[in-house]
């Protein structure tokens, strides 16, 4: 897909120089840069979503006391000699 974007002249010139140095076309350089940027920011929405879910919850995030007791009782006693 073709698209048109506006960028400052100095950024364009720096991109041209880097593409030339790396032996890439301008399109390849911009594709790689955008891919890298998206990869870097891909998980941000996950944390925000989880924060929103837990913010709305009135329940404590602490383990239920009965469940905690049952889990503790299910563990074998260990001798710490």
Image (cartoon, rainbow, N blue to C red):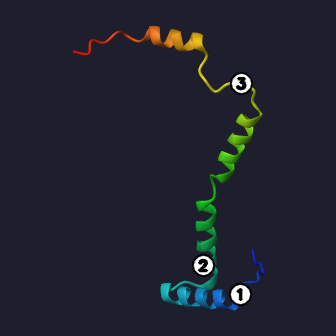
Q: Is residue 78 above or below residue 51?
A: above
The circle drawn on residue 30 is: none
Quadrant placement of the C terminus = top left
Residue 21: % across, % down:
49, 88
Foreground tag (3 vs 1): 3
Q: How far apart, in angstroms, are the residues tagged by discs 2 and 3?
A: 49 Å
* Of pointers 2 and 3, the one earlier in the residue sequence: 2
Question: To which residue does mark 3 refer?
Answer: 59
Q: Is residue 45 above or below residue 64?
A: below
Residue at 58% x, 10% y: name it.
66
Question: To which residue does mark 1 refer?
Answer: 8
Badge 3 crowding class, 10 Å Cα cut-off, few under 14, some 14 to 19, many 20 or more, is few
Q: How far apart, in angstroms, are the residues tagged by discs 2 and 1?
A: 19 Å
Residue 35: % across, % down:
61, 67
The circle drawn on residue 28 is: 2
17, 52: nearer the viewer:
52
Residue 62: % across, % down:
61, 23
Q: Secondary structure at mark 3?
A: loop
Looking at the rendered structure, the number of numbered marks drawn on it comes to 3
């Amino acid at each position: 897909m073709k698209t048109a974007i506006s960028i400052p002249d100095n950024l364009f010139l720096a991109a041209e120089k880097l593409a030339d140095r790396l032996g890439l076309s301008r399109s390849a350089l911009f594709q790689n840069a955008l891919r890298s940027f998206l990869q870097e920011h891909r998980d941000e929405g996950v944390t925000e979503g989880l924060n929103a879910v837990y913010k709305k919850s009135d329940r404590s995030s602490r383990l239920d006391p009965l469940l905690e007791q049952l889990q503790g009782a299910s563990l074998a006693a260990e001798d710490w000699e």
